[in-house]
Image (cartoon, rainbow, N blue to C red):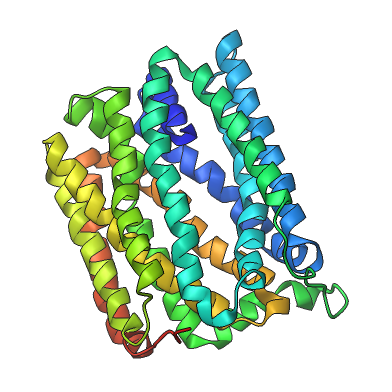
């Protein structure tokens, strides 16, 4: 809901593709600036409480968007500043939430657990954009007010979660300990190849940042159509996550990872050339399905290959890679769209994703062979 409202409101204010890209950039800056700190927080404090605090902070930011829209003082700079606060809260939330999961289920069930949690998130991503687009017909304030209530509800629900005793640091906080998560990833070539593949593939395939432009200028639809476009990737992702929750990836994880990245690139190209709403929705659905498959494989491997006392720090590095690919990918798409037009920007990204997949298949042969242990 929030993404739809911010994207549509900002594009209505400025008409700038570059500004849409800046939304991703300002969310990315806290991720890279706080990576070393958030990992330590997730490993030294109650991960559940960290997530609760982050949700409350996100509720405050959404409330500021609602008040600014209602009072009429919310400008381009104000939107970007509040989005920066949201990015900072998510920088702490994502590693803590990811590192919490292995304390709720046995290690052997991690692939199914990741798929199940993801299916819940994708269901929200289907309803959210459609609801956000519909509510935006009444203006941005009702959307942001609803988002505020939902963030607070999420905080209350997470506070009720029962889990094992939180991990505590086993050593003193030193300069060297700040970099232990990065060092672990660099030592394990499989993790490095996996995370860097996602980094460059999704960095180039950030077509969703340009959905407001496609909705209004290419497909000729309004906020409701933008909501459908936002929801389409989640539809594909939800279908895939439901299948993976019942039939987790196991022996063929490596080949399936590369298939998912290649399909993601092809779907991005198909969306880029489409001028029909139905075809665009179909391409985005396939894009979301393939992306979800790679997400589940990646998250499962990271959690299963990391000691619990370091999961916060490694999850922070993981969030840095995914944040770079997602938020910085949105900025890259906005910049290319400003320079060459939105269609050319999406096509460059899709073809680039295919090239990255081919290069990584050659440079990281272990990625083609790895397996995920079953329950």
Quadrant of the image occupied by residue 107: bottom right
Q: x%, y% of residue 98?
A: 60, 64
Vertical comparison of 185 with 163: above or below: below
Residue 122 location, x and y as percent?
A: 41, 50
Residue 339 seen anywhere in this rendered image of the structure = yes
Residue 271 falls left or right of residue 373 = left
Left or right: where 236 falls relative to 83? left
The x, y position of residue 153, in whole percent, is 64, 38
Q: Examine the rendered structure and indicate whether residue 14 appears above or below residue 301.
A: above
Quarter location, residue 197? bottom left
Foreground pick, 234 / 298: 234
Q: Nearer the viewer, residue 334 or 373?
A: 373
Q: Visible in this render: residue 331? A: no
In this view, the residue in front, 10 or 251, is: 251
Q: Which residue: 70% across, 74% down?
A: 179
- Residue 6 picture location, percent across and down: 47, 29
Q: Residue furthest top?
A: 71
Residue at the image position 38 percent from the left and 19 percent from the top:
12
In the image: residue 48, left or right of residue 317 = right
Placement of 239 over or under 43, stated as above or below: above
Q: Is residue 115 above or below residue 28?
A: below
Q: Please tell me which residue is depicted at 68% across the width and 68% down the height of the picture.
A: 312
The residue lying toward the viewer, choosing from 261 and 307, is 307
**Residue ID at (43%, 76%):** 194
Name the image quarter holding residue 182.
Answer: bottom right
Numbered-mark total: 0
């Amino acid at each position: 809901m929030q993404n739809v409202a911010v994207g549509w409101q900002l594009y209505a204010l400025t008409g700038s593709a570059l500004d849409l890209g800046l939304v991703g950039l300002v969310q990315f800056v806290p991720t890279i600036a706080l990576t070393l700190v958030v990992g330590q927080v997730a490993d030294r404090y109650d991960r559940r409480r960290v997530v609760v605090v982050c949700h409350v902070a996100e509720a405050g930011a959404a409330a500021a968007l609602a008040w600014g829209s209602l009072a009429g003082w919310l400008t381009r700079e104000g939107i970007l500043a509040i989005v920066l606060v949201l990015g900072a809260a998510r920088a702490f939330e994502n590693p803590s939430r990811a590192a919490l999961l292995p304390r709720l289920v046995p290690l052997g069930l991690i692939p199914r657990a990741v798929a199940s949690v993801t299916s819940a998130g994708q269901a929200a991503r289907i309803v959210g954009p459609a609801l956000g687009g519909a509510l935006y017909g009444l203006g941005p304030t009702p959307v942001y007010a609803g988002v505020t209530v939902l963030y607070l509800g999420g905080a209350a629900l997470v506070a009720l979660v029962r889990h094992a005793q939180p991990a505590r640091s086993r050593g003193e906080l030193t300069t060297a300990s700040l970099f232990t998560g990065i060092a672990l990833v660099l030592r394990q070539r499989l993790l490095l190849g996996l995370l860097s593949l996602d980094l460059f593939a999704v960095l180039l395939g950030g077509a969703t940042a340009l959905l407001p432009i496609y909705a209004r200028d290419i497909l000729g639809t309004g906020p409701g159509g933008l909501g459908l476009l936002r929801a389409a990737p989640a539809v594909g992702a939800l279908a895939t996550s439901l299948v993976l929750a019942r039939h987790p990836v196991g022996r063929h994880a490596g080949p399936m990872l590369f298939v998912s990245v290649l399909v993601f690139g092809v779907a991005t190209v198909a969306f880029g050339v489409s001028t029909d709403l139905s075809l665009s929705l179909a391409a985005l659905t396939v894009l979301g399905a393939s992306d979800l498959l790679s997400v589940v494989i990646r998250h499962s491997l990271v959690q299963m290959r990391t000691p619990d006392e370091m999961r916060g720090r490694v999850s922070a590095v993981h969030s840095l890679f995914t944040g770079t690919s997602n938020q910085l990918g949105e900025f890259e798409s906005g910049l290319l769209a400003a320079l060459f037009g939105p269609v050319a920007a999406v096509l460059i990204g899709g073809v680039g994703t295919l090239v990255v997949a081919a290069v990584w298949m050659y440079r990281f042969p272990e990625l083609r062979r790895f397996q995920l242990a079953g329950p």
